[in-house]
Image (spheres, helix red, strand yellow):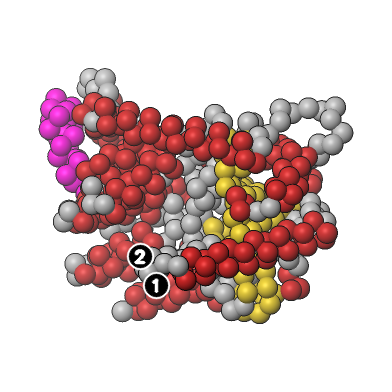
Amino acid sequence: MSHVTTSTVVFAINHSHVFVTRWKEALVAPCDFEPLSNKMRTKVRPLAALGILSTVAGLADAFSMPSMSMSPMAMITSTFQSENDDAIQECRKRAEMRHAEEFESGAQYFGQSSPKCNDTKDIKSWRTDDFTSYSVGTGNGGPSELKLKDGHVIFETKEAVFDDNTCDFFIQTARETIRQEKLSDQEKALHSDNSDGQTTNSDLGEARLSNLSPDALEKLNLLLQSNLYPMLQERLGVEDLAVYDGLILGSIAPSISQPVHRDASLLTLNIALSSPKEFQGGGTYIEGLEDHSGLPLCIERGKVLCHSSGIMHAGTSISAGERWVLVLFVIAKNEAQIARRAHAEGLDLIRSMNLSEANIAFETGLLEAPNDHVLHMGIGQIASMTGNEQESMNRLSKAAACYPASHKAAMALGKMFESKRKPRAALRRFDNVLSFIEDKDLLNGAWMPLKALAWDARVSAGR
């Protein structure tokens, strides 16, 4: 801020609307900035509006000048809200309506969690020492993290929750469901002149919960009420739960890894139905685990992983054998997840090229979760599509600063600097990525997409 003089501050304070406009224009050009450390990345923002504006406000105090009643950043947000209030409220209403429909459907189909009851002998009582815990760091648990207790933590049960017979039952049920669906798909293809070419669940080796047999659904509901719902209530502090969706996923080698993603739910349960002895590779890659090798978590048969669905993760490939996993997606009656649903709506609107409506959807999400990196990247995508390169770079900078564990924004920003013939700025972004990875890509068994990303960063840095 060495360029800020007393006259600049006076002008900014006395001409607040001009100040907002000029700094808003300046903010779209990210500076050549390198965070001091991984921990500081969540506190220090390159050309972050809040930092600049709070610095100016501090200078105003230092010069005993009158302070603005509302910060310029709040004014920007307030202006957006006032200009788009009706559209924002409509977006929120749509999200709330979808949530209510999903919760009602899930509660009817799979059952709703019962209130806590200490004198019910059939309900498992969970304690802290029943779990091994892993952390992605506070602030990295997704847009609903603050609505949860320990929303940045992944919990693994130390003991199996499903016994061998239960695991075998669900594997056989899934096999039969997939077999029946394939027969049905083949029958439809024989009687149809036009195939839509869409990939079905059976093609992917997935058996959706809604297609399981009634006895399987009944068994699952008993396990939810007696074990799984109480686990989520105790560990993540949420009541009134219902499974919205889920699947039994069978991977037959050689399989491919999933991309890193969030689940379309509030909470995720991952139950291993196969023993790690039955396959090679596999497991769940969790992005940004602290104090961890970065290798995928591969749990024993019958054990459970539970976590906020907003934590970025991916199922990893196997090179031999078969791996079966039961995955349950859980929502809560009183948490509509406006930010997540607004992001999903924004992506749909981008696909249909309704870019202004998509931008409003993403901004609606940011009102709920202002530091959500995927929402900033969504706005950046719209800026890129409309030719606003500076705004796109600004949003990539914001996304990378909000969530350093995701390297997509930093890599994209580095390559944009490279294309603009700013090699030192580009190199800093590539070096930041490699610094965060810490050679974890070189470990035996490292997640293959992490290896590819680190290779790209090294090649780009070398270039």
Can you tell which mark lies on residue 411? 2
Q: Residue at x 76, y 42 (%)?
A: 222
**Label 2: few (<14), some or many (≥20) within 10 Å?**
many
Looking at the image, residue 131 sits to the left or right of residue 138; the answer is right
Along the line of sight, the residue nearer the viewer: 93 or 198 = 198
Nearer the observer, 92 or 50: 92
Residue 339 x/y as whole percent: 42, 39
Number of numbered tags placed on the structure image: 2
Q: Give the quadrant of the C terminus.
A: bottom left
Viewer-side residue, 198 vs 67: 198
Asked if the residues shown at circle 1 and circle 2 are in contact, with their CB atoms under 8 angstroms apart, the answer is: yes
Q: Which amino acid lies under the numbered mark 1 shown in the image of this protein?
A: Ala
The answer, for residue 77, to whether it is visible in the render is yes
- In the image, taking residue 41 as reference, residue 249 lies left or right, namely right
Q: Which mark is residue 457?
A: 1
Q: Is residue 3 magenta?
A: yes
For label 1, the crowd category at 10 Å Cα-Cα, with few meaning under 14, some 14 to 19 and many 20 or more, is: many
Question: What's the residue type where badge 2 is placed?
Answer: Met
Picture layout, residue 256 above or below residue 265: below
Residue at 68% in and 64% down: 176
Start and end of the magenta stretch? 1-28
